[in-house]
Image (cartoon, helix red, strand yellow):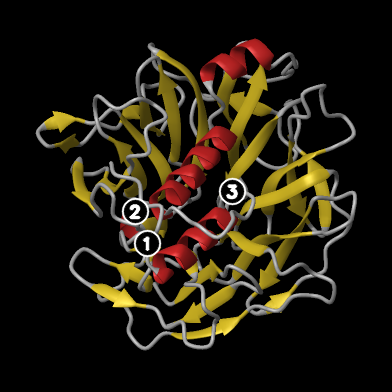
């Protein structure tokens, strides 16, 4: 790929926003749009799937009380794929507004997740000149909710369910020497330290209160599940040939989607039971050759949204191509091309994906692209992070300022 050191103004603005969302320092006067996209993806992957060598060699913490005896994944009654709403068309006429912030909140605020109904949103804001690096935020509709002092440094919430139970992590007082985070949940207006994991993260929670994430121990990084915020964790089994992994989403029917790292690949994996093998997603073909890896960006219902690395590329190569995968019929759809400055962040049960490019934010269904309005939101293009299952609520982040919500 040819570097783009001198992109057009729109590309420069989008790169700055993408770098902000990736948590990278602001660069100087020059931006590289594609590198900003891939740096963000790599940083997210490194946060969610620790490099194999680092996980095995540097993790010196103990994981206690993790069971492997759960016969079946906990499921919410009457919440299978067939029961989910399936909107007919991508909504037009979306209206953008800003979510409120409290006095003193930083302009560096971003959305990190939302519940599938679109009611609840979670995010974080940088706290300048304070001991706490990030302050987690929760909105109910367009109302910012009060929260108590976070349980540690770099506190972040990744997901929230329809009851307002949120999950994430913080580096608390019990952190190990490497300052690895511990998993937490926000339940009933209080922080709850999740049991049985000395180091790890809680990545997702469904409406039944089932939580998934990962744990670090001397053997590396492993996907885990908690039946509730007060339950002991259960280790999710990984197939032979994969060294480390994480669970990134749990649907209301109990299906868990994760990401596994092998010696020479990264693949999505789906658990429907702990007594039967799960399903390892195939790799798409690019130019007639199977890809090297498929990194999960988001998952919901029948769909997995991710970034694919072509075969023959070095692991640190910047080439990542967005794909949408449908589990029920094992089909892929390529959503971008090599070198194209585009990023996708969220997907709903209808398979509608939200993303952004220098021209602005958009929703993409299987046959239609709808542009999201950004007039009055500043010079930088917003990046949508989540889309509700009915398609009527989309939430995202700006380069500087409060999060933006589109109601359609």
Q: Quadrant of the C terminus?
A: bottom left
Instruction: Give the CA separation, mark 3 to mark 2.
Output: 17 Å
The earlier-in-sequence mark between 1 and 3 is 1
Residue 387 visible in the snapshot = no
Circle 1 packing at 10 Å, graded few (<14), some (14-19), many (20+), is: some
Q: Looking at the image, which residue is at 56% across and 23% down? A: 222
Q: Looking at the image, which residue is at 70% across and 50% down? A: 156
Q: Name the residue carrying label 1.
A: 84
Q: Is residue 348 above or below residue 374?
A: above
Dot 1: element:
loop
Number of numbered labels in the structure image: 3
Between residues 290 and 61, which one lies in front from this camera angle?
A: 290
- The quadrant in which residue 175 appears is top right
- Does the residue at mark 2 contact the one at mark 1 (Cβ under 8 Å)? yes
Instruction: Give the CA separation, mark 1 to mark 3.
Output: 17 Å
Q: Quadrant of the N terminus?
A: top left
Between residues 207 and 332, which one lies in front from this camera angle?
A: 332
Q: Name the residue carrying label 3.
A: 205
Q: Name the residue carrying label 2.
A: 81
């Amino acid at each position: 790929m040819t570097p783009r050191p001198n992109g057009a103004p729109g590309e420069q603005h989008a790169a700055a926003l993408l770098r902000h969302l990736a948590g990278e320092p602001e660069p100087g006067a020059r931006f590289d749009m594609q590198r900003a996209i891939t740096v963000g993806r790599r940083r997210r992957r490194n946060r969610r799937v620790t490099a194999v060598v680092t996980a095995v060699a540097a993790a010196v913490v103990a994981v206690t009380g993790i069971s492997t005896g759960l016969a079946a994944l906990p499921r919410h009654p009457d919440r299978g794929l067939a029961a989910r709403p399936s909107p007919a068309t991508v909504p037009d006429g979306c209206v953008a507004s800003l979510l409120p912030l409290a006095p003193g909140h930083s302009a560096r605020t971003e959305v990190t997740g939302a519940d599938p109904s679109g009611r609840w949103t979670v995010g974080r804001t940088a706290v300048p000149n304070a001991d706490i690096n990030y302050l987690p935020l929760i909105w109910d509709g367009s109302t910012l909710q009060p929260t108590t002092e976070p349980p540690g440094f770099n506190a972040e919430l990744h997901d929230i369910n329809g009851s307002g139970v949120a999950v994430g992590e913080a580096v608390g007082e019990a952190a190990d020497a490497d300052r690895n985070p511990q998993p937490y949940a926000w339940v009933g207006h209080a922080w709850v330290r999740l049991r049985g994991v000395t180091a790890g993260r809680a990545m997702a929670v469904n409406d039944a209160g089932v939580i998934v994430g990962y744990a670090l121990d001397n053997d590396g990084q492993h996907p885990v599940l908690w039946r509730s915020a007060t339950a002991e964790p259960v280790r999710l089994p990984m197939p032979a040939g994969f060294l480390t992994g994480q669970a990134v989403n749990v649907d209301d029917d109990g299906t868990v989607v994760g990401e596994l790292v092998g010696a020479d690949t990264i693949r999505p994996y789906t658990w429907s039971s702990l007594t039967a093998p799960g399903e390892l997603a195939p790799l798409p073909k690019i130019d007639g050759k199977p890809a090297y890896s498929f990194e999960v960006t988001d998952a919901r219902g029948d769909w997995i949204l991710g970034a694919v690395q072509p075969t023959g590329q070095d692991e640190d190569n910047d080439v990542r191509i967005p794909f949408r995968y449908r589990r029920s019929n094992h089909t892929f759809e390529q959503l971008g091309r090599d070198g194209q400055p585009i990023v996708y962040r969220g997907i709903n049960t209808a398979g509608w994906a939200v993303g952004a490019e220098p021209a602005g934010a958009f929703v993409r269904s299987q046959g239609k692209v709808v542009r999201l309005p950004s007039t009055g939101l500043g010079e930088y293009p917003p990046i949508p992070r989540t889309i509700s299952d009915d398609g009527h609520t989309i939430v995202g982040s700006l380069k500087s300022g409060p999060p933006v919500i589109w109601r359609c």
